[in-house]
Amino acid sequence: MKSYIKRFILSLIIISSAINIFAQEMQLSGGFEAGFGIFKVYKDFYYSSYPLSNGHINENTQSSFFALGISLSVRVFPDTDNFVSTGFIFRDRAIFMTNIKQTGTETFTLSDDHFVSIMDFDMGVSFRYKILNGFQLYADLGLNFTIMDSENFKTSDTFNYLGFGIFTGVALQLNLNKTLYLEFGVNSINNIFSGQEGTYHMSNNIKVNYEDSGRWDLTSVAAYIHFGVRFDLKKIWNRSQR
């Protein structure tokens, strides 16, 4: 699983670097993010473990959650003057669940015994509209890659999730000056398929490792606020050649 993550991150770096060569404007921003989501789990598998000859585990749950975290984004555009521009966006987010409500159970706050984190990598197309002097509207659409890790330190159960899906976003930028800006936005992810690995620790010291897959199992919507810096790549390049 780790090798796939490294390859994916390396490919993003190569793609973004190649696009930057042909871009005139680059925007780098970061800030805080708060989101809600729904995560569905359906596991149905058999196992064999001593002293039991075999067993069957079936889990079919739906959890709604609230999460807080930080996010970073990079946008690049081939021009700076056009009213409508099409560019590229790359986003990285890390959020941590604070409250989870499962179907048929009460809401609970995650304690020190249970840790759930989500990291997203998104890349795609960004459309910019200069609606007013000092304001820009953005619409983003692309692919999403999600890593989710869960560990219960009390029971020693673990859960690792890799998901692929669709990323969308809408944002409004307010220019503070020619270089600095504030960005307010809403984004969403909807994973189409996933791969899951985990460990159950059962009674009689039985440890069960499993692998499973999911479909349309993770959806989240988040609001964020970013502080950003805008760069003119052509000017920077020309100065470096002098």
Image (cartoon, rainbow, N blue to C red):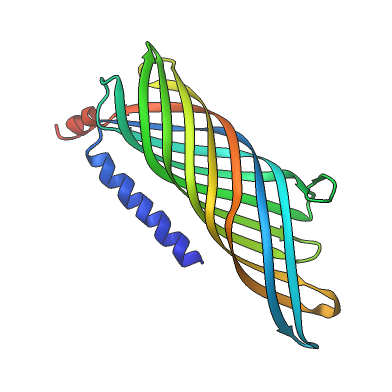
Q: In the image, residue 187 lies at what x, y percent?
A: 53, 35
Residue extending furthest toward the left: 242
Q: In the image, residue 136 lies at what x, y percent?
A: 40, 20
Near-viewer residue (125 or 173) = 125
**Left or right of residue 186: residue 59:** right
Q: In the image, residue 122 lies at what x, y percent?
A: 45, 45
Residue extending furthest toward the top: 133
State whether residue 232 is above or below residue 64: above
State whether residue 186 is above or below residue 137: below
Residue, x 42% and y 27% (percent of image)?
138
- Disc tally is 0
State whether residue 75 is above or below residue 12: above
Near-viewer residue (78 or 163) = 163
Q: In the image, residue 123 lies at what x, y percent?
A: 41, 44
**Left or right of residue 224: residue 78:** left
Q: Quadrant of the C terminus?
A: top left
Among the 4 quarters of the image, the one containing residue 238: top left
State whether residue 130 is above or below residue 9: above
Residue, x 56% and y 55% (percent of image)?
147
Residue, x 22% and y 38% (percent of image)?
22
